[in-house]
Image: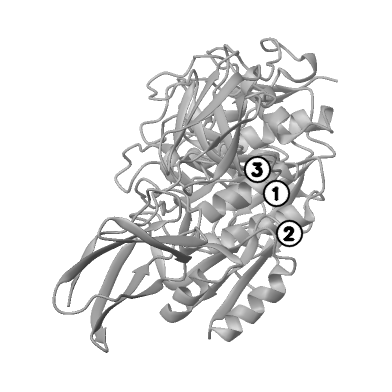
């Protein structure tokens, strides 16, 4: 039955501290054991996240052994979203671990914070069920999120709040060992209330799991957030949605953890971020987890459908939702509410709609939920935005409710006619045909040697791109295979044909010849030596321009002549039967 909920005016207003942190553009995602951290991020001295290669079988065991061997203090071990550990380590240990073959890369741990900013009045639920303004003070819904589990990765949830009666399930506490994930900040309770509160929630019957990764001040660490994501990945009960209204400096390890959790079947809604310390909007692609393509990254709007001045922008923003002056539950009592603003408040609206969708589409993958929400949104309505996708969240597209959406999107067509050609000893150029009209971009994968099966993604390029120059990670004289596929919000295409090329061989090092002369019973003797010995079995020895011998190519040769008296001889050596020769030397007697 269709139900109508009239919005209530807020009963109390409580200030919420703005603890969001500015960041700077991310470094390139590490692909080796290099130590990485985001420039400008608030790093934590001597504390590191060590990510193992996927082939490591017993990640927790290896983590404990390495931490003990290197005099470290272990904080977390990871075995699900990523494999690895977080620890406080002395500098020599970091240097040693960088050379460990089990280590993929190391990041310095950093501060992660909530993303709320200010306070005012309520209207968010009202806006999600309407295509256009004005608001009608009603929230219409056909689903409640029943049967869906929502994981709130935040400051915890006030376990006694009446908004969540009988709907809280087990969670995880990364702040207090053995803790209950009870909220002492308010932010997580507010977010949970928007996702699934009885009064203030989008999905009023969803089960809620508190994942406490931020402390009473709304602050935490990247390693702690990864521990929360790892727990969700290991303990998820599907259908599942997770909300991350938090952020910090760009982090490859956090991004990887979220991507793998999405691949495990958890739909993620994440906050785009609230700009720098002065509230100036920033590119969301400079934040983690906002820059994770597989998550729904959410910007914030006002009640006039304008992007808020502080909401981050850019191609990493997937959708907008109400985020200014949102009223929801608070942590100070079992009935407390608060009105605050931020992309933290926008993201849980999307997580709630994801729960509504999963109630009806229980077997949907995370990418299908992503596509459905994007497609069901109200197109191009958000103003004052520097983002290409200026679309606003809409909830009634699910199950034929009140206004629907556009036809369901489809994955793009696969590219074709992929070619690969070597440009040098360290570069291979690719070219392909774009057969789609609606792709968001292309993923490029590579493996070493023709006929190989171990593929890895090396790059992502934008829509309408048909060429790519691979100039990193290549060795001379080596064969590589490539394949390309397109992607958009509906999913990914099939792969193109496979194309292979072999990088040019590096020129052989020149043969360096040296020699000394002596006399044995008055006869001239030349002792020759050369490096390198080259690849041929034999070497031709030339004296005064004429070949005098073909000898074993072992790097030395003695020419015992019958010449007497004084004079000189010239020598050179060549790989047998070739023109690959050494320098010419003159030996005086």
Of the numbered discs 2 and 3, the one sitting upstream in the chain is 2
The local crowd at label 2, few if under 14, some if 14 to 19, many if 20 or more residues have their Cα within 10 Å, is: many
Q: In this view, does 80 lie above or below 8?
A: below
Of the numbered discs 1 and 3, the one sitting upstream in the chain is 1
User: 587 left or right of 16?
Assistant: left
Q: What's the mark number on residue 338?
A: none
Q: Is residue 27 above or below residue 37?
A: above
Q: Position of residue 388 (x, y in %)?
A: 45, 21
The local crowd at label 1, few if under 14, some if 14 to 19, many if 20 or more residues have their Cα within 10 Å, is: many
Which of the 4 image quarters holds residue 318? Answer: top right
User: 101 left or right of 304?
Assistant: right
Marks 1 and 2 sit apart, C-alpha to C-alpha, by 8 Å
- The quadrant the N terminus occupies is top right
Marks 1 and 3 sit apart, C-alpha to C-alpha, by 32 Å
Outermost residue to the bottom: 521
Residue for badge 1: 151
Q: What's the mark number on residue 171?
A: 2
């Amino acid at each position: 039955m269709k139900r109508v909920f009239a919005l209530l005016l807020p009963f109390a207003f409580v200030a919420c501290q703005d603890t969001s942190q500015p960041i700077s553009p991310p470094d390139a995602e590490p692909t080796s054991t290099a130590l990485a951290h985001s420039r400008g991020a608030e790093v934590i001295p001597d504390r590191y996240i060590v990510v193992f290669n996927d082939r490591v079988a017993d990640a927790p065991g290896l983590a404990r052994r390495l931490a003990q061997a290197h005099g470290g203090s272990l904080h977390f071990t990871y075995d699900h979203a990523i494999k690895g550990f977080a620890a406080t380590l002395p500098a020599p240990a970091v240097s040693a671990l960088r050379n460990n073959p089990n280590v993929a890369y190391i990041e310095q741990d950093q501060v992660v914070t909530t993303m709320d900013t200010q306070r005012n009045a309520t209207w968010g639920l009202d806006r999600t069920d309407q295509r256009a303004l004005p608001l009608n003070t009603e929230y219409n819904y056909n689903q409640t999120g029943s049967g869906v589990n929502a994981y709130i990765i935040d400051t915890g949830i006030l376990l006694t709040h009446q908004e969540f009666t009988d709907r809280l399930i087990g969670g995880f506490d990364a702040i207090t060992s053995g803790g209950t994930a009870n909220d002492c900040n308010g932010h997580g309770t507010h977010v949970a209330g928007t996702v699934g509160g009885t009064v203030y929630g989008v999905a009023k019957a969803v089960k809620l799991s508190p994942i406490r990764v931020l402390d009473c001040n709304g602050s935490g660490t990247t390693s702690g957030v990864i521990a929360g994501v790892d727990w969700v990945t290991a303990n998820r009960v599907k259908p599942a949605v997770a909300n991350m209204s938090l952020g910090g400096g760009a982090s490859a390890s956090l991004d990887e953890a979220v991507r793998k959790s999405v691949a495990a079947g958890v739909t993620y809604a994440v906050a785009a971020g609230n700009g720098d310390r002065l509230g100036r909007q920033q590119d969301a692609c400079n934040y983690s987890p906002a820059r994770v393509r597989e998550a729904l990254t959410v910007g914030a709007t006002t009640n006039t459908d304008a992007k808020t001045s502080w909401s981050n922008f850019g191609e990493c923003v997937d959708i907008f939702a109400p985020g200014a002056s949102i009223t929801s539950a608070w942590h100070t009592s079992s009935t407390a509410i608060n009105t605050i603003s931020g992309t933290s408040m926008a993201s849980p609206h999307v997580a709630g709609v994801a729960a509504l969708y999963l109630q009806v589409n229980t077997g949907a993958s995370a990418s299908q939920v992503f596509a459905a929400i994007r497609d069901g949104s109200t197109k191009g309505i958000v103003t004052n935005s520097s983002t290409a996708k200026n679309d606003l969240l809409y909830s009634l597209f699910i199950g034929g409710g009140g206004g629907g959406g556009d036809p369901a999107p489809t994955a793009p067509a696969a590219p074709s006619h992929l070619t690969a050609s070597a440009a040098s000893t360290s570069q291979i150029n690719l070219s392909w045909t774009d057969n789609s009209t609606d792709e968001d971009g292309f993923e490029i994968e590579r493996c070493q040697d023709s006929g190989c099966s171990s593929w890895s993604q090396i790059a992502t390029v934008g829509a309408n791109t048909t060429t790519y120059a691979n100039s990193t990670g290549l060795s001379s004289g080596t064969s590589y295979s490539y394949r390309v596929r397109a992607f958009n919000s509906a999913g990914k295409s099939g792969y193109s044909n496979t194309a292979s090329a072999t990088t040019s061989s590096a020129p052989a090092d020149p043969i360096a010849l040296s020699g000394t002369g002596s006399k044995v019973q008055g006869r001239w003797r030349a002792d020759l030596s050369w490096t390198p010995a080259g690849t041929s079995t034999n070497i031709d020895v030339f004296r005064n321009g004429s070949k005098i011998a073909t000898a074993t190519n072992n790097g030395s040769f003695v020419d015992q002549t019958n010449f007497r008296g004084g004079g000189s001889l010239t020598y050179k050596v060549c790989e047998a039967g070739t023109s690959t020769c050494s320098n010419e030397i003159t030996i005086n007697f």
